[in-house]
Image (cartoon, rainbow, N blue to C red):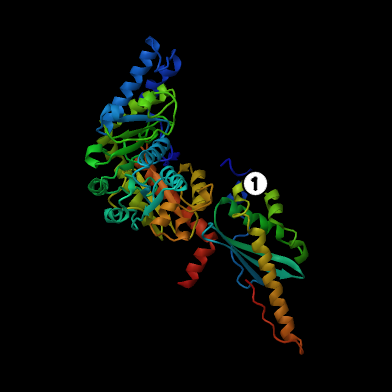
Amino acid sequence: MAVYSDKVMEHFTNPRNVGEIEDADGVGEVGNPVCGDMMTFYVKVKDNKLDDVKFKTFGCGAAIAVSSMVTEMALGKTLEEVREITPEAVAMELEGLPKNKMHCSNLGAQALNKAVDDYLSKQKVQSNSKSKSGKRKTKTRD
Amino acid sequence: MRVYLDNAMSAPILKEVRETMLPCLQEVSGNPSAFHDWGDAARETIEQAREQVAMLIGADTEEIILTGSGTEANNSAVKGLALARWSKGKHIVVSAIEHFSVLQSARSLEKMGFELSLVPVDSHGIVDPDEVRRAVRKDTVLVSIMHANTEVGTIEPMAEIARITREHGIPLHTDAVATAGTIPVDVKALGVDALSLSANQFYGPHGVGALWVRKGVRIMPLLDGGTQEGGRRAGTENVAGIAGMGKAAQLAREAMQDRMAHLLPIRDRLLTGLPAAIGHVEVSGHPVQRLPGNASFLVEFIEGESMLMMLNMKGVAVSSGSSCMSRALKASHVLLAMGVPHEKAQGSLLLTAGIDNRLQEADYVVEVLPPIVDRLRQMSPLYAKFEKAK
């Protein structure tokens, strides 16, 4: 499979952290079946750090390798550090991705960030409902 | 085990074909248009090949235009036949599941001011002749419907479609790249006016094809230049390639029944074996009106490229019509035209058997694919959702 780097092939063949987290603190879903790639990321947060990250991915070899790489890059990072995981950084760690896969398949960072957003919004809801004066805010996100 | 089941994409070149081609490459080869012995020898080689190709499809020798590929034959047919009738009307009709060389040629004509009607297909990929009847108009100058679709294997009711176009006096072209040399193809029995074929589909070399145009049907040349091919296709001929196509055509005609008898059990082993071994797998295309080597499937909840990559690791070569497999990142237009939803089309898997395949190879695929599908489904959020909904 010469279109993919050795690193992509290695992550595709032995993907890390596949699965779901039953009691996840945050969940992020991206993609759609029209372009052919869908990813769901689950995060568990402890002391402001990603304690556990898992994924499920429907997609091509690149999509699976990207997901696996993102979990590896994210584990143990603080919530602030996680924001530095960009699609470009993931592609670089994977020793490059084919040009036409850069957009569609490289959604892992986005899914991870969405999961962290989900965690943060839940935190906000919790702290808001705890405070006496605070009105109950339920933020809807897309 | 190494199992090559991607014969529709590229088939092996037969030894006899190679041996026919080699002298054309090794010895001094004259230009077939030249006026000396060397030129005569090259011309004779070409004319013999033309006759072999004509015999394969029951055509007259002088009706064969040798081309540089099936794609070129389709481009020549669609553009050349429509443009030759430019003054009579500007409406053309093609099916929604044509090969890109027909579809994009039709789109090019649209840009030049032609109107295009796409004939739909049913869920098996069959073109309903009545749909063709509804689509044609007074100003229709060309109908082009493929004889069979490579991707799902469906064979179209050409003779019935031809009856309609004949009634209306409209030329009918068929892309027979998937059928010529594979199943019996006779231009008179099909009733068409033009037909494209490609040499590699019947174990000839790549980069050679032919377009048959019925005598008396006008066609505008795609390539202008010299007077080769009666002025219908300019350019010095690829003598070795053409010789190879001729030999391959002769062998295909002689061995056709044997080859079909060889392919059918392999195809059927796959068509019955895989859905039996794996849940949520269905055969795409028509169950009976089907190419002898074509086994195509829709595997739910997973994507084609990742299946293909894992099969490759097991030494198995196949194809898929998923978005990821196309440079344009679009799911197969054939499957979408058949009404297959996007996420199902992503799980397209295409296995095409050839004369070198053995029945044990089909068994091997039936053995190695289920754990691959299982593994990918364990990773798939779609499968997780399906399981939870149960």
Indicate left or right for B326 with B282 as reference: right
* Number of other residues with Cα within 10 Å of mark 1, as a class: few under 14, some 14 to 19, many 20 or more: some
- Chain where mark 1 sits: A
The residue furthest bottom is A132
Q: Nearer the viewer, residue A2 or B105?
A: B105
Q: Say above or below: B247 vs A80.
A: above
What residue is shown at x 42% (from left), y 46% (from top)? B106
The quarter of the rendered structure image containing the N terminus of chain B is: top left
Residue B326 x/y as whole percent: 51, 48
Q: Nearer the viewer, residue B47 or A42?
A: B47
Q: Is residue B312 visible?
A: yes
* Helix, strand or loop at mark 1: helix
Residue B173 x/y as whole percent: 32, 42
Q: Say above or below: A53 vs B317.
A: below
Residue B388 x/y as whole percent: 50, 71
Residue B117 x/y as whole percent: 38, 53
Total number of numbered labels? 1
Q: Nearer the viewer, residue B214 or A99?
A: B214
Indicate left or right for A84 with B92 as reference: right
The residue furthest top is B37
Q: Nearer the viewer, residue B221 or B13?
A: B221
Three-letter amino acid code at disc 1? Lys
Residue B74 lies in what quarter of the image? top left
Q: Is residue B364 visible?
A: no
* Residue bearing the label numbered 1: A7
The residue furthest front is B87
The quarter of the rendered structure image containing the C terminus of chain B is: bottom left
